[in-house]
Amino acid sequence: MLRIGVLQVFITFCMILLGGVVHNTGSSLACPDWPTCFGTFFPQMTGGVLIEHSHRLLGMIIGILCIIQLALGLKIRLEFKRIYLWSIGLLVLVIYQGILGGVTVLFQLPPQVSTLHLGTAELIFVAMIAQVIRIYRVQKSLPKFTEKLPSSRLLWITLVAVYLQILYGASVRHFGYSAGCGLGADYSMLCMDLETGGRVFWPSIGGSQFHMGHRLLGILSALMVIISTIPLIIWAKRTKNQLIRLWAGSAHLIVIAQIVFGIWTLSSHIETLPVSLHLAGATLLLGVVFFLAHYLSALKCAAKKGAQSNHE
């Protein structure tokens, strides 16, 4: 089950990334019908159809893996009820995501539904990471530490901020405000004021303000990621926990990469590659923060149970 869970996480990440490519290349309606593509499940895989239908096929693969995971969970449903119930929830969520994808196509890309479609995909991604951690805890015992573990509260708050930032970014893109502050290197930091034509920190037009809000929330999210992971890095260094140190350090690298990708996106006039990398970075950051928060909570739970057992 552990290997299938890891495979689910990887394919889901690829599906999210490919979904971004679908939108960024204008391939969202390359298949005008759903669930088939031009009336068949095996269309000619060229151009936009190749991109759009490949995205659908990845979704089908994820659904099949969820069914396999659920079937394997039947064997342990009495002993490990949470893993079994979580497998059911994942399958339901993937089916719901598929329906959202169909609604997106059949109703000609309503921005609200398109944003919800990405938001649900991100939820599936972190839910699958949670399932992997649960299975890992069953198959392999978690390490125990005598030193007090750092608090995970700020990490959970940071996770919410990163998720909201992803939804905000999707709204900017799907509602057509990607160029709201102007394009090119000159407008990658400050915003173009459509009334005066100059560069300002806060524009006067609503659409531009909406775009600038995404940048400001991005700065806030970045600061929260750095602040919430620094105690983990210090603790991991002191306890020689290379796993936590690696993941917390990678969060800082992803934050830097996200800033670079955001500037590159605007400087390149919203080319497909930097936009796709920006989405990939956001998804990775969400996954890393979730892993740290969930894994730290699991360590605390294991430590608490160990203390209770010793007391008894």
Image: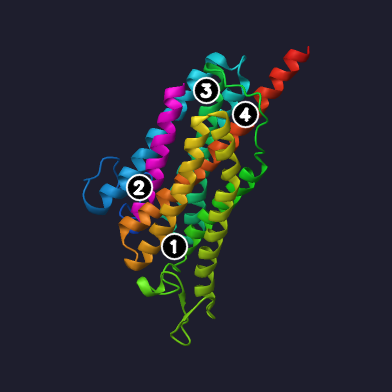
Q: Which residue is mark 2?
A: 18
Q: Which residue is mark 1?
A: 173
Q: CA distance from mark 1 to mark 4?
A: 36 Å
Q: Nearer the viewer, mark 2 or mark 3?
A: 3
In this rendering, the answer to whether 99 lies above or below 203 is above
Q: CA distance from mark 1 to mark 3?
A: 37 Å
Closer to the chain start, of discs 1 and 3, is 3
Q: Amino acid at mark 4?
A: Ala
Can residue 80 be seen at all in this image of the molecule?
Answer: yes
Closer to the chain start, of discs 1 and 4, is 1
Marking on residue 298:
4
Magenta stretch in the rendered image: 1-23
Residue at the image point whose x is 57% and y is 59% from the top: 220
Q: Which residue is mark 3?
A: 136
Can residue 25 be seen at all in this image of the molecule?
Answer: no
Badge 4 vs badge 3, beta-carbon distance below 8 Å:
no
Task: Give 87 or 11, whichever is nearer the viewer.
Answer: 11
Task: Give 213 or 27, whichever is nearer the viewer.
Answer: 213
Residue at the image point whose x is 46% and y is 23% from the top: 2
Q: CA distance from mark 4 to mark 2?
A: 32 Å
40 drawn magenta: no
Q: Provide residue 238's location: percent of width, then percent of height.
A: 57, 32
Closer to the chain start, of discs 4 and 3, is 3
Q: CA distance from mark 2 to mark 3?
A: 28 Å
Residue at the image point whose x is 64% and y is 32% from the top: 297
Rate crowding at label 3 as few (under 14), some (14 to 19) or many (20 or more) other CA atoms within 10 Å: some
